[in-house]
């Protein structure tokens, strides 16, 4: 796409009425009042113009008008540290604004278009579902059913473009990769399927990694710098067998989990205080050692502060010393004290045992911890957070599944496991087997997807949700990638996740799309993106970053909690990245109208 199309001249030419009014104003206060009134009139005119033709255009006009009026408020200027009203005033009076880039103009251009009932409509429903005004009854139903058949066929075609680890060709590639890696590491088949062998042979250094995977120059430089500067890094041999050396479109999603980008490594290295990388501010929500508590009836218990494999963008990387680091186990004395703290707070009905990855502990330690928690009479649910189902599925032995299943008491206490499958290409026959062991013992399994750039193409997440359900994993959360500076390579505009939820996930059957899209607000917790009432778009910065104000979950309970403001990823920058990997960005045209 040509970012030169978005500039000052195009913005003025496309909105003559707005800038004619602005030229009549000398003060921001006057401009705010008159533009707010004008935007309301233009929105009503657009609604009359498209009435009966397109509900989506009417909704777009309403949403864009609301956003523009909010951006004109003095409070929005103060919170964002930038004035949209001043920009309109300066442009109208011919004042230079060299700070404004194409991504800024692109967003403003499209939002103003949307308020006037204009702009692209490339959502599949608009393409495939046309009104059947001349038909009624059974004839109308048959016609609509035929349209739905065409729509589903197109959705299936698009989802089929993404790798599925259960397809025969993928299974065969992984079989060959496994044989190759086993040969290098000198492992028998029995050893390969022993989780202890996997842990003992985690790949932690560049020379061995280069023997097992074809690395790009940047990947090699980043891993080398990470190892030299003692950044936590490690990949299980099993997960290395999932990498296809770049010959599949989904391979980037696998690599992105474990091979850190160079900008990430450089920023972390240059951060003198690791605790400053604590994006969620867990220190402020830890009332006791090993405990995190943000919500009324649930707390987190962290007995094991490491993992068999490091996910680059994990929110807790800052406190993990290394893969399977020595001394990561908290010790039973500290765990016992934490359990007693939980016992003293009977309002807590659910405990999430996480870390680190608690299933990287030995069976005996897991059983000891669960048995202690089971003695707390008020606990109704034991939830275990783990990624071993994906990074080391052989960890789910019959013995371990039996241990967890024993703490399930129907009608009294449930046991659930929450994992993190990031891409449908990660789902293998071994993952299916592991999940089945849990489900057969009455243990529910849920998934948390982190919506990164590498999983954000059209229908990519939908393909994952569809496969998850077939495996026996229920979609639970889709997390907007956290706004951490060091993980900028992974970040996706909030507008893209909202677009995905409204235009892709909604085309799936209900049980496949029932996860919640959320933004994790530092120190406050989950902000549900499904409802626009949980946030406001305050402004658009010169580089095209939208600035959002998030309201805490307690907003209807307590007036003492502050809101949280943060800039997002510029939409134009995101679209250009998609184009660079071969995506047709016309498919994403409606992204501008999600806020």
Image: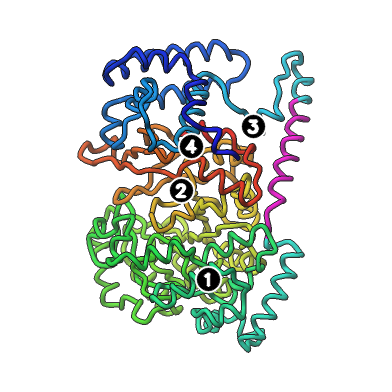
Query: If the image is split into quadrants, where does the N terminus sit?
Result: top right
Report if the CB atoms under discs 3 and 1 are less than 8 Å apart. Answer: no
Residue depth check, mark 3 versus mark 4: number of the one nearer the observer:
4
Q: Secondary structure at mark 1?
A: helix
Q: Which residue is mark 1?
A: 401
Q: CA distance from mark 3 to mark 4?
A: 23 Å
Decide if residue 343 is on the left or right side of residue 371: left
Q: Which residue is mark 3?
A: 122
Q: CA distance from mark 3 to mark 1?
A: 47 Å
Decide if residue 287 is on the left or right side of residue 142: left
Q: Secondary structure at mark 4?
A: helix
Please give the label number shown on residue 102: 4
Sequence-first disc among 2 and 1: 1
Sequence-first disc among 2 and 4: 4
User: Residue at the location (78% across, 30% down)?
Assistant: 146
Q: CA distance from mark 2 to mark 4?
A: 25 Å
Residue 63 lies, in percent from the top left, at: 46, 25
Q: Quadrant of residue 304?
A: bottom left
Residue 92 lies, in percent from the top left, at: 39, 20
Q: Secondary structure at mark 2?
A: strand
Sequence-first disc among 4 and 1: 4
Q: Quadrant of residue 322?
A: bottom left
Residue depth check, mark 2 versus mark 3: number of the one nearer the observer:
3
Is the stretch drawn in magenta largely helix, strand or loop? helix
User: Residue at the location (49% across, 47% down)?
Assistant: 492
Q: Is residue 152 shown in magenta?
A: yes
Query: If the image is split into quadrants, where does the C terminus sit?
Result: top left
């Amino acid at each position: 796409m040509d970012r030169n199309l978005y500039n000052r001249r195009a913005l003025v030419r496309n909105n003559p009425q707005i800038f004619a009014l602005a030229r009549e104003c000398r003060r921001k206060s006057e401009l705010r009042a008159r533009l707010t009134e004008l935007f309301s009139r233009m929105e009503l005119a657009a609604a009359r113009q498209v009435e009966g033709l397109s509900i989506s255009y009417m909704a777009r006009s309403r949403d864009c008008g609301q956003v523009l009026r909010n951006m004109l408020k003095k409070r929005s200027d103060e919170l964002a540290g930038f004035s949209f009203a001043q920009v309109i005033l300066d442009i109208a009076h011919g004042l230079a604004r060299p700070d404004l880039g194409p991504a800024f103009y692109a967003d403003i251009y499209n939002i103003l278009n949307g308020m006037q009932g204009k702009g692209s409509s490339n959502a599949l429903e608009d393409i495939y579902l046309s009104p059947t005004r001349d038909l009624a009854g059974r004839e109308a139903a048959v016609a609509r059913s035929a349209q739905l058949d065409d729509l589903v066929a197109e959705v299936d075609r698009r989802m089929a473009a993404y790798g599925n680890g259960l397809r025969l060709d993928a299974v065969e590639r992984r079989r060959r990769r496994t044989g190759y890696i086993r040969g290098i590491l000198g492992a028998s088949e029995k050893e390969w399927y022993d989780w202890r062998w996997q842990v003992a042979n985690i790949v932690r250094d560049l020379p061995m990694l280069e023997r097992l995977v074809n690395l790009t120059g940047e990947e090699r430089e980043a891993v080398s710098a990470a190892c030299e500067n003692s950044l936590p890094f490690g990949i299980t041999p099993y997960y290395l067998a999932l990498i296809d050396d770049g010959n599949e479109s989904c391979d980037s999603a696998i690599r992105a989990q474990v091979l850190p980008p160079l900008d990430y490594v450089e920023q972390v290295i240059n951060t003198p205080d690791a605790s400053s990388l604590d994006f969620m501010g867990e220190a402020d929500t830890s009332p006791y050692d090993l405990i995190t508590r943000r919500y009324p009836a649930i707390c987190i218990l962290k007995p094991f502060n490491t993992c068999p494999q490091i996910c680059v963008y994990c929110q807790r990387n800052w406190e993990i010393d290394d893969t399977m680091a020595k001394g990561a186990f908290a010790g039973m004395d500290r765990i016992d004290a934490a359990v007693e703290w939980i016992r003293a707070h009977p309002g807590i009905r659910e405990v999430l045992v996480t870390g680190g990855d608690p299933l990287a502990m030995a069976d005996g330690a897991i059983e000891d911890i669960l048995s202690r928690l089971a003695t707390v009479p008020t606990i109704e649910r034991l939830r275990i957070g783990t990624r071993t189902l994906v990074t080391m599925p052989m960890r789910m032995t019959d013995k371990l599944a039996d241990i967890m299943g024993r703490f399930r008491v129907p009608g009294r206490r449930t046991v659930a496991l929450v994992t993190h499958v990031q891409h449908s290409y990660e789902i293998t026959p071994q993952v299916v087997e592991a999940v089945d062991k849990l489900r057969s013992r009455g243990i529910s399994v849920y998934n948390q997807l982190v919506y990164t750039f590498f999983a954000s193409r059209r229908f990519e997440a939908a393909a994952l949700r569809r496969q998850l359900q077939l495996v026996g994993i229920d979609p639970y959360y889709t997390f907007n990638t956290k706004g951490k500076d060091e993980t900028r390579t992974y970040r996706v505009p909030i507008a893209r996740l909202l677009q995905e939820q409204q235009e892709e996930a909604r085309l799936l059957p209900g049980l496949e799309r029932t996860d919640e899209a959320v933004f994790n607000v530092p120190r406050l917790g989950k902000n549900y993106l499904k409802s626009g009432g949980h946030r406001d778009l305050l402004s658009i910065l010169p580089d095209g970053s939208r600035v959002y104000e998030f309201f805490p979950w307690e907003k209807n309970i307590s007036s003492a909690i502050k809101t949280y403001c943060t800039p997002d990823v510029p939409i134009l920058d995101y679209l250009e990245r998609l184009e660079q990997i071969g995506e047709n960005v016309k498919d994403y045209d409606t992204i501008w109208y999600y806020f």
